[in-house]
Amino acid sequence: AQSVAQPEDQVNVAEGNPLTVKCTYSVSGNPYLFWYVQYPNRGLQFLLKYITGDNLVKGSYGFEAEFNKSQTSFHLKKPSALVSDSALYFCAVRDMYSSASKIIFGSGTRLSIRP
Amino acid sequence: GAVVSQHPSWVICKSGTSVKIECRSLDFQATTMFWYRQFPKQSLMLMATSNEGSKATYEQGVEKDKFLINHASLTLSTLTVTSAHPEDSSFYICSAYKAGAAYNEQFFGPGTRLTVL
């Protein structure tokens, strides 16, 4: 079965420090991977995606993610965290067995940036 | 471009009533829309896939007679929660698949918070 796993329910980082939100995936074939962010009582906002090409993907708000095929990981990173980055982050993978472009979401990681 | 709206943004209703939630793609045509529900501090769970002009495809465990989905046009899908009960209280989010968008990208609406008293 295809899935993504986010092993950390919560990540706490001091403002100005680098942050990493972890994601591992399990898919057959080449994965289409995504990161989304959700602020309280809001829908999801797209951050970045990996389809093919460079393993380091740059996205919105200074975030980037590194695709690592050998470790089946797609960790989200930012060199210097901001308090405004505090939100819920979801890793997702395209359901390759679906003809309807379905996306499978991870359980989410709450990122808390302290001043 | 690629903006998806939802209406209402929040709704409170009495148990036993029906509630309709609209999902609109504002600047593109969406042949496929998806409906998710999200409980507090949990991930998004796909409820159904809505295809314009045809019946929705429901995920396992989702009652199609309780969650009625209509995708009558290329820019509008509606979710009606029939005979709502408190356990239906949740955050409902729709997304739209933009035909021709790169790599099956979905665009998400802002969500609708439903509270059933």
Image (spheres, coloured by chain):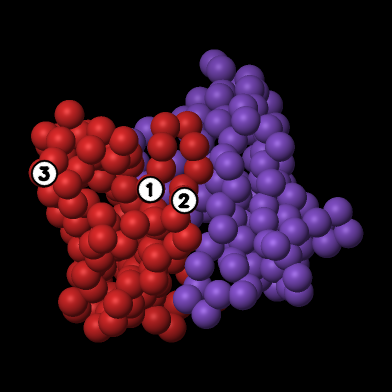
Instruction: Please state the horizontal and vertical placement of residue B21, each as a whole percent of the image.
Output: 19, 54
Who's purple, chain-wise? A
Q: CA distance from mark 1 to mark 3?
A: 19 Å
Instruction: Pinpoint the chain carrying mark 2.
Output: B
Q: Going from the N terminus, do you reach mark 1 or mark 2 first?
A: 1
Residue tagged by mark 1? B37
Disc 3: CA contacts within 10 A as few (<14), some (14-19) or many (>=20): few
Location of residue A32 by image quarter? bottom right
Q: CA distance from mark 1 to mark 2?
A: 5 Å
**SS label for mark 3:** loop
Who's red, chain-wise? B
Q: Is residue A34 left or right of residue A3?
A: left
Q: Amino acid at mark 1?
A: Arg
Residue tagged by mark 2? B45
Of residues B25 and B32, the one drawn nearer to the viewer in this rendering: B32
Instruction: Please state the horizontal and vertical placement of residue A68, each as a whole percent of the image.
Output: 81, 57
- The answer to whether the residues at label 1 and label 2 have Cβ atoms under 8 Å apart is yes
Q: Going from the N terminus, do you reach mark 1 or mark 3 first?
A: 3
Q: Is residue B55 left or right of residue A60?
A: left
**Quadrant location, the N terminus of chain B:** bottom left
Instruction: Pinpoint the chain carrying mark 3.
Output: B
Q: Is residue B114 left or right of residue A5?
A: left
Q: Are marks 1 and 3 on the same chain?
A: yes
Q: Is residue A91 left or right of residue B9?
A: right
Q: Which residue is painted at 18% across and 52% down in the image?
A: B82
**SS label for mark 1:** strand
Q: Amino acid at mark 2?
A: Met
**SS label for mark 2:** strand
Q: Going from the N terminus, do you reach mark 3 or mark 2 first?
A: 3
